[in-house]
Amino acid sequence: MVESEAQEEEEEDIRVRRLPQAIVIGARKCGTRALLDFLEVHPRVRAARGEVHYFDREERHNLGLSWYRGQMPLSRPGDVTLEKSPAYFVTEAAPARVWRMNTSIQLILILRDPVARVVSDYAQHVHRRVSKDLPPKPIESLVLTRNGDGRVNPNAKMVQTSLYHRHLRRWLRYFKPDQIHLVDGDRLVSQPHSELQQVEDFLGLKRHIRPEHFVFNATKGFYCLAPSVSSGRGKKRRQRCLGSEKGRRHPSVANSTLTALRHFFAGHDERLVQLTGRTFDWMR
Ligand code: A3P
């Protein structure tokens, strides 16, 4: 057996399932899948395939840490194990639960224009209803108050998820600001490599991800992984784009509704800037 093969075999032997050192906690519809799939281009990143939902679903949390560890991929020493479950960000109980598992864990949070996020959530609602042969509800019934005054309902679920500063404040009761890395979702769309390099730095990984790893696919309207880029899912001859459920065409929304949403979120954007000390692409 040649030396490198022997070494590889030895490494295989020490592959085990480990609890994640970092978690992508959200936010829903902000680019969490793109972030995780693209990060896997890094040879030392190992990500759980699906969303694990250990910290937000009672019945899963009750299964205990050994169940959670079992959901993680095999990894070698020096690899970074990751999982993403965007529901964690908005779940009251999640920060304390994560903290009880590991007080020094690294958290990654990707955010995008809160109005675009609401519309993206609505696009998913439309898709789900149509695929079940049901008529979609008008967006107004899901995000505005019922009395017809055209105001945003701050308690509506789709609106709540975009109240980033509120949820983030809850996480900051348990974790230091330098434990939470913020990714600009709009910039992940326009220049994926630069956002991913910052994540590599945050995770303490040697920089590996380069602009050549991505190609812009005009049909999809998004960057995809370039052909022959190795990632957690192996090497592909053709470019690899995210599935059709990511980067959907958004349904058209009445201007008055969009204006109401923009008005509503403007104040919340300011609070996010105050809390994090940074601005995001959508605020410019
Ligand atoms: P839209 O479908 O509204 O465009 P999540 O994975 O958290 O559900 O986020 C989905 C969003 O990821 C998509 O929302 C899309 O805007 C964004 N995204 C970012 N980079 C992408 C990429 N390279 N390909 C497809 N979608 C991407």
Image (tube, grey):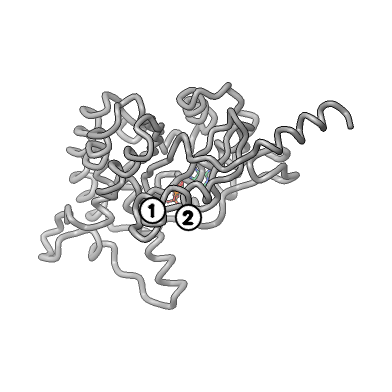
Q: Is mark 2 within 8 Å of ligand 1?
A: yes
x and y, in percent, of residue 2 in the image: 88, 29
Residue 150, above or below 74: below
Outermost residue toward the right in this view: 1
- Circle 2 SS class: loop
Q: Quote the CA–CA distance across marks 1 and 2.
A: 8 Å
x and y, in percent, of residue 79 in the image: 58, 32
Among numbered discs 1 and 2, the one appearing first in the sequence: 1
Callout 1 crowding tier (Cα within 10 Å): few <14, some 14–19, many ≥20: many
* Type of the residue with mark 1: Ser
Label number found at residue 120: 1
Residue sitting at 37 percent across and 29 percent down? 104
In terms of image quadrants, where is residue 176? top left
- Circle 1 SS class: helix
Residue 51, above or below 37: below
User: Which is nearer the eye, 21 or 37?
Assistant: 21
In terms of image quadrants, where is residue 266? top left
Discs 1, 2 touching: Cβ within 8 Å:
yes
Q: Quadrant of the N terminus?
A: top right
Q: Is mark 1 within 8 Å of ligand 1?
A: yes
x and y, in percent, of residue 3 in the image: 84, 26
Residue sitting at 28 percent across and 62 percent down? 139
Task: Provide the residue designation for mark 2.
Answer: 248
Q: Quadrant of the C terminus?
A: top left
